Amino acid sequence: MPIMNRGAGSISLHDSYALVFTPMTKDKFLRIYANLPAPERGQVIAIIEGKTYSWDVAFQEISNDTELGRKILKYLQQLGIL
């Protein structure tokens, strides 16, 4: 199975296959983010390499097309959020 549970809902980012990111993936994240109530945007959405990231940080990283933003998108796609 490509998604590996390592406890407490963590997901491995080193799976044996590559997820394909399209502008649609990024657009879907941006639509979800736009519809979140402001207080929810501070909530943790991803844990990558032991660090937590909120919706706000994810938005900044994904909008700026950073490596971290791509990792967050991959994590959210593996969780089935995107």
Image (spheres, rainbow, N blue to C red):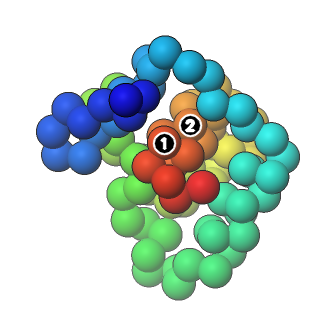
Residue 79 drawn above or below residue 12: below
Residue 44 found in image quarter: bottom left
Dot 2 falls on a residue whose secondary structure is helix
Nearer to the camera, 38 or 81: 81
Residue 19 percent location from the top left of the image: 63, 31
Identified at 41% across, 55% down, the residue is: 45
Identified at 42% across, 28% down, the residue is: 2
Residue 30 found in image quarter: bottom right
> Which kind of residue does numbered mark 2 sit on?
Lys
The reply to whether residue 5 is visible in this rendering is yes
Q: Residue furthest toward the bottom?
A: 37
Q: For the C terminus, which image quadrant?
A: bottom right
Q: Nearer the viewer, mark 1 or mark 2?
A: 1
Q: Which residue is mark 2?
A: 74
Residue 78 percent location from the top left of the image: 48, 42
Q: What is the crowding at mark 2: few (fewer than 14 residues within 10 Å), some, or many (at least 20)? A: many
Q: Residue furthest toward the right?
A: 23
Nearer to the camera, 50 or 80: 80
Residue 73 percent location from the top left of the image: 59, 42
Q: Which residue is mark 1?
A: 78
Whether residues under marks 1 and 2 lie with C-beta atoms below 8 angstroms apart, the answer is yes
Q: CA distance from mark 1 to mark 2?
A: 6 Å
> Which kind of residue does numbered mark 1 sit on?
Gln
Dot 1 falls on a residue whose secondary structure is helix
